[in-house]
Image (cartoon, helix red, strand yellow):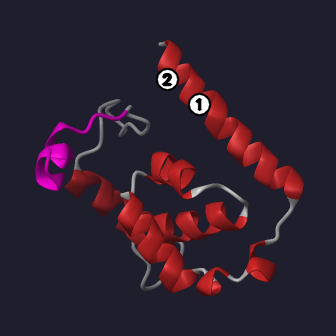
């Protein structure tokens, strides 16, 4: 299966609903994000910027690339590209982090995956 075909058949749980209790459309989510961003006075940041930040922070907290892929929805290649560009060249000293936080994030992800597999 090619990347284009895989993207068309990708299924994921709906985790965000709009005010009408319906899944967001791309345009609706983008417009609402921009409105909230502007109201907060944040300049020059897109939703995808936040997803990239999440990739970096999850890595800093000790999550594996595979865990990051399943949490953020990025492809493995995209996760690797983001980490190579923004993860301070994967500096081990920078990667050290709070063990309790790392354990909590990865344990929460493990429970989430187990719940998906049993439902």
State the residue at coordinates (25%, 39%).
Answer: 10
State the residue at coordinates (29%, 32%).
Answer: 22
Viewport quadrant of the N terminus: top left
Q: Secondary structure at mark 1?
A: helix
Q: Residues within 10 Å of mark 2 (few under 14, many from 20)?
A: few
- The numbered dot on residue 112 is 1
**Which residues make up the magenta segment?**
1-12
Q: x, y percentage for residue 102?
A: 77, 53
Q: x, y percentage for residue 72?
A: 47, 53
21 lies above or below 69? above
Identify which residue, 76 or 34, lies in the foreground. Answer: 76
91 lies above or below 32? below
Q: Residues within 10 Å of mark 1 (few under 14, many from 20)?
A: few
Q: Is residue 112 visible?
A: yes
What residue would you read off at disc 2? 116
Identify which residue, 21 or 59, lies in the foreground. Answer: 59
Give the distance between the C-alpha atoms of the residues marked 1 and 2, in whole angstroms.
6 Å
State the residue at coordinates (55%, 71%).
Answer: 53
């Amino acid at each position: 299966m090619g990347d284009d075909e895989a993207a068309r058949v990708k299924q994921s749980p709906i985790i965000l609903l709009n005010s009408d209790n319906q899944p967001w459309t791309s345009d609706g989510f983008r417009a609402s994000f921009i409105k909230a961003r502007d109201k907060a006075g944040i300049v020059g940041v897109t939703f995808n910027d936040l997803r990239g930040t999440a990739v970096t922070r999850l890595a800093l907290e000790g999550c594996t690339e595979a865990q990051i892929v399943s949490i953020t929805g990025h492809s493995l290649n995209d996760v690797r590209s983001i980490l190579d560009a923004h993860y301070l060249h994967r500096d081990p000293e920078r990667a050290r982090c709070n063990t309790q936080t790392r354990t909590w994030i990865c344990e929460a992800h493990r429970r989430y995956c187990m719940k998906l597999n049993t439902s």
